[in-house]
Image (spheres, rainbow, N blue to C red):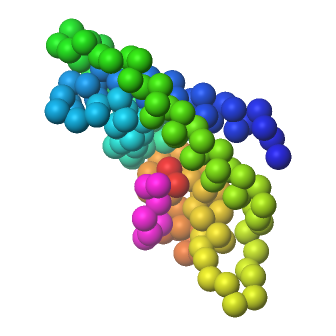
Amino acid sequence: MQFGLVAVWIAAFLLLGLLAVPLATWLFRDMDAPALAIPLALAVLGVVGFLVGHVAFGWPALLAGLAVLGTLSALSVTRVEPDWVAFREPAVVFALGFLVVVALRAVDPVAAPLPLAVGEKFLDFGLLKTLERASTLPPADMWYAGQPVQYHYGGHA
């Protein structure tokens, strides 16, 4: 297993959450806002990435999503006082949950059919590879050449 990549992904998610704390504090004033920072950051990146991805997918979509998230958080800092310390507990819970999922995947990482087992590992793998090669959204269908994917690929993107 590539432990360096696991550390990079955890760091990326936590930094995104940290960046979204002011926006979460502004949007969710009556709730435990820092606990919603990571999902909010991923939602903003996902929506902006999906919209920009119809023109240019990949780095342009990611950079546009980061720019929107950063701008919204910067504007939110002027309106509310974010509780940065309160982000520690959700960050620890997220990191532990992430490591549990990585450990589970490390036990059985293969995309292979098992006897009497069902699953969509082949589809997941195919959608990830298709998105990796895509220059715009929707990506090309891996089974129906020349046509766009007619399946929900948003989570994979």
Counting from the top left corner in percent of width and height, residue 153 is at 47, 60
Q: List x then y, in percent, for residue 133.
A: 62, 50
Question: Which of 20 and 69 lies nearest the eye of the viewer?
Answer: 20
Say whether residue 149 is magenta: yes
Which residue ends up furthest to the top in the rendered image? 78
**Residue drawn at point x = 39 percent, y = 17 percent:** 84
Tag count in the figure?
Answer: 0
Whether residue 124 is situated above or below residue 93 in the rendered picture: below
Q: In this view, does 76 lie to the left or right of 38?
A: left
The percent position of residue 24, horizontal first and vertical second, equals 28, 29
- In percent of width and height, residue 32 lies at 28, 34
As drawn, is 47 to the left or to the right of 38? left
* Residue in view at x 75 percent, y 88 percent: 115
Q: Nearer the viewer, residue 16 or 145?
A: 16
Residue in view at x 80 percent, y 41 percent: 2
State the residue at coordinates (76%, 55%): 106
- In front: 126, or 1? 1
Asked whether, in this view, residue 55 is left or right of residue 134, the answer is left
Magenta stretch?
Answer: 148-155
> Is residue 60 visible to us here?
no
Q: Quadrant of residue 20?
A: top left
Q: Could you tell me what secondary structure mostly forms the magenta stretch?
A: loop
In this view, 93 is above or below 79: below
Quadrant housing residue 142: bottom right
Q: Which of 150 and 73 is in front in this view?
A: 73
- Please, which residue is most extreme toward the bottom here? 116
Residue 71 vertical placement versus 51 (above, below): above
Q: Can residue 1 be seen in this view?
A: yes
Task: Judge whether residue 152 is colored magenta.
Answer: yes
Q: Is residue 72 placed above or below 154 in the rendered structure?
A: above
